Image (cartoon, helix red, strand yellow):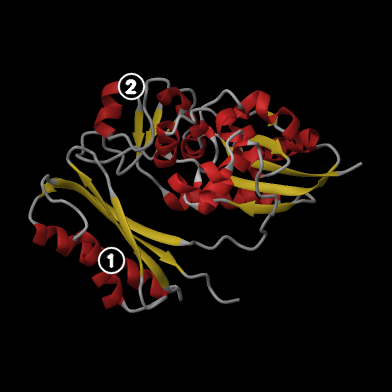
Amino acid sequence: MSERWILHVDMDQFVAAVEILRRPELRGRPVVVGGAGDPTARRQVVSTASYEAREHGVHSGMPLRRAAQLCPEAVFLPADPAAYTAASERVMAVLRRFPVDVEVWGWDEAFVGGDIADPVALAGEMKAAVFAETGLTCAIGIGENKQQAKIAARFAKPGGVHQLTSATWMAAMGPRPAAELWGVGPKTARKLDEVGLHTVAQLAATPPEALVARFGPRQAAWLPVAARGGGDTHITTEPWVARSRSRENTYAEDLSDPADIAREVAAMARALGAQVVADGREVTHVAVKVRYVSFFTPTREMKLRDGPTTDLDVIERAALHLLTKFEWKRPVRLLGVRVDLAMPLT
């Protein structure tokens, strides 16, 4: 008898794995991908690292120079987004051959859902098919909803299959930090710690009304449900559509002059806006990110007052307005701009 199941397919070390497929001699060696692939260059960061490199403490977002210090024997490679997109498309094509619905989440993830008699057997068949067709491995989590499947895939990595259900959820997740829930970021985790809710079990036992003052009504309602293993069961099969676009730049020399900072942000906002408009999209929100030399990285964002726009002047003014929300007591090493997009009309 078939039941409704959600599977989360999560590719193993995807970017590094694609590079190793192109260079089989690198298999088993620590591989670091990022920037131009030059660990002597200033202010370039790791995009991803192979498991062998991660064993030395290398992780995404780390400066390449630091990665070279931790793992001097690593092979450093430049990022090649076109190759990763092509590999991702091959993986998703394999998944779509099965009698299930497929929802793509970026290059290396997808949710799969349907009425499935034996989800563990299906997961094994999918893993084998992906490897046979692409040479890439994946972990697959199985659950009654996306939250359970997403978390189960973490237990399955690398290359395994794991199942979580409402019956097994609390035994597996209850003692774990609330920060391990999908959708609970560092800021929310800090707030939970501040009110004494450290574990998933503690959060699950908390009534939403006790959280409203600290988290607002929407998040207060969602947090205990997620902690009890609840989640979305809907699979969207429409082609993935970007909900935001962003650009950022790490500078070889720190920026201290507010005029230089404003000029950089204005240019970034206009270039990003032009790209969005060329794609036939409208901007609804603008955000600016600043990373100081201390690595403190605040972000400020705003909703455009007059609604979605394609006006580059409006986008630029919003970005410059957000700069007034930052303090400029320290030099800046990175600037970024993000725009959120209105969904295209169908």
208 to 277, vertically: above or below: above
Amino acid on which the number 1 mark rests in the picture: Ala
Q: Residue at x 19, y 39 (%)?
A: 42
Q: Residue at x 48, y 28 (%)?
A: 198
Q: Is residue 18 left or right of residue 152?
A: left
In the picture, the quarter occupied by the C terminus is bottom right
Q: Position of residue 29 (x, y in %)?
A: 43, 23
Q: CA distance from mark 2 to mark 1?
A: 39 Å
Residue at the spot of label 1: 269
Q: Residue at x 35, y 42 (%)?
A: 78
Using the rendered image of the protein, determine whether residue 157 is visible from the camera's viewpoint: no
Picture mark count = 2
Would you say the residues marked 2 and 1 are in contact, meaning their CB atoms lie under 8 Å apart?
Answer: no
Q: Position of residue 25 (x, y in %)?
A: 46, 28
Q: Which one is in front, 18 or 336?
A: 336
Q: Is residue 101 left or right of residue 55?
A: right
Crowd tier of the residue under label 1, counting other residues whose Cα lies within 10 Å: few below 14, some 14–19, many 20 or above:
many
In the picture, the quarter occupied by the N terminus is top right
Residue at the spot of label 2: 73
